């Protein structure tokens, strides 16, 4: 809702849009908009131009659902990756976090969230069916569940485990070096890397 105390309705509308971004309050949004207004027009216009290019040209990998510049991401298409192992994560930021540890050389599968009845997110809202289809590839030997160590993350782990148990694939879960209740993106790289390396069979974690 546009505030009446702004000197410009255009300014108010811009602040409203910026404040809709995660973690951005109204005051921060106002500072961001005023900063843009201080820039020369050529520089300032690059910002909406880049947003437009992101919306028009960005892809989501058809295999793992990671963000990509092409239909198949660079990780899935790389011959240097271990294609027998898939690490299942909640979102794209988790892929980036694990890649920064340099402790994992397999493939990924981005679920697009975790099961959360409180937020109305069920299994049908996630990329679980495509994970099951990928598991039917005889090349896949292990699936690592690397979801946040929260109640929702554990619920999602258990659901996926039940969906994949018939495949006979080794299903692992990251070690609890990641504190209970933590999200992966807020875990330091050393701890996260060790949690990947020290993963354990999922059944022993139940």
Image (cartoon, grey):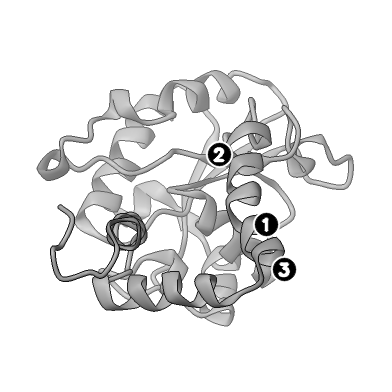
Please tell me which residue is depicted at 63% across the width and 32% down the height of the picture: 56
Please identify the quarter of the rendering in which residue 58 is found: top right
Marks 1 and 3, how far apart in space?
Answer: 33 Å
Disc number for residue 46 = 1
Image coords of residue 164 (percent x, y)? 43, 27
Categorize mark 1 by other alpha carbons within 10 Å: few (<14), some (14-19), many (20+). Answer: few
Nearer to the camera, 59 or 186:
59
Categorize mark 2 by other alpha carbons within 10 Å: few (<14), some (14-19), many (20+). Answer: many
Q: Do the residues labelled 2 and 1 touch (CB within 8 Å)?
A: no
Image coords of residue 132 (percent x, y)? 49, 23
| Number of residue marks | 3
Please tell me which residue is depicted at 47% across the width and 60% down the height of the picture: 174
Mark 3 highlights which residue? 102
Secondary structure of the residue carrying numbered label 1: helix
Marks 2 and 1, how far apart in space?
Answer: 33 Å
Q: Which of marks 1 and 3 is nearer the N terminus?
A: 1
Q: Which of marks 2 and 1 is nearer the N terminus?
A: 1
Q: Earlier in the sequence, mark 2 or mark 3?
A: 3
Give the number of the mark in front: 1 or 3: 1
Nearer to the camera, 69 or 196:
69
User: Is residue 118 placed above or below 44 in the rendered structure?
Assistant: above
Q: 154 left or right of 203? A: left
Please identify the quarter of the rendering in which residue 100 is found: bottom right
């Amino acid at each position: 809702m546009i505030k009446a105390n702004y000197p410009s309705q255009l300014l108010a509308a811009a602040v409203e849009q910026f404040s809709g971004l995660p973690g951005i309050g109204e005051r921060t949004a106002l500072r961001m908009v005023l900063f843009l207004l201080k820039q020369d027009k050529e520089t300032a216009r690059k910002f909406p131009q880049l947003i437009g290019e992101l919306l028009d040209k960005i892809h989501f990998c058809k295999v793992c659902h990671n963000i990509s510049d092409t239909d198949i991401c660079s990780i899935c298409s790389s011959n240097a990756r271990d294609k027998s192992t898939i690490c299942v994560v909640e979102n794209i930021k988790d892929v980036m976090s694990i890649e920064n540890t340099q402790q994992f050389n397999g493939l990924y599968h981005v679920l697009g969230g975790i099961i959360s009845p409180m937020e109305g997110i069920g299994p049908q809202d996630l990329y679980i069916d495509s994970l099951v289809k990928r598991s039917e590839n005889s090349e896949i030997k292990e699936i690592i569940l690397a979801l946040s160590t929260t109640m929702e993350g554990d619920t999602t782990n258990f659901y996926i485990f039940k969906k994949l148990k018939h495949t006979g694939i080794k299903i692992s879960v990251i070690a609890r070096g990641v504190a209970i209740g933590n999200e992966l993106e807020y875990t330091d790289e050393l701890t996260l890397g060790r949690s990947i390396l020290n993963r354990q069979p999922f059944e022993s974690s139940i």
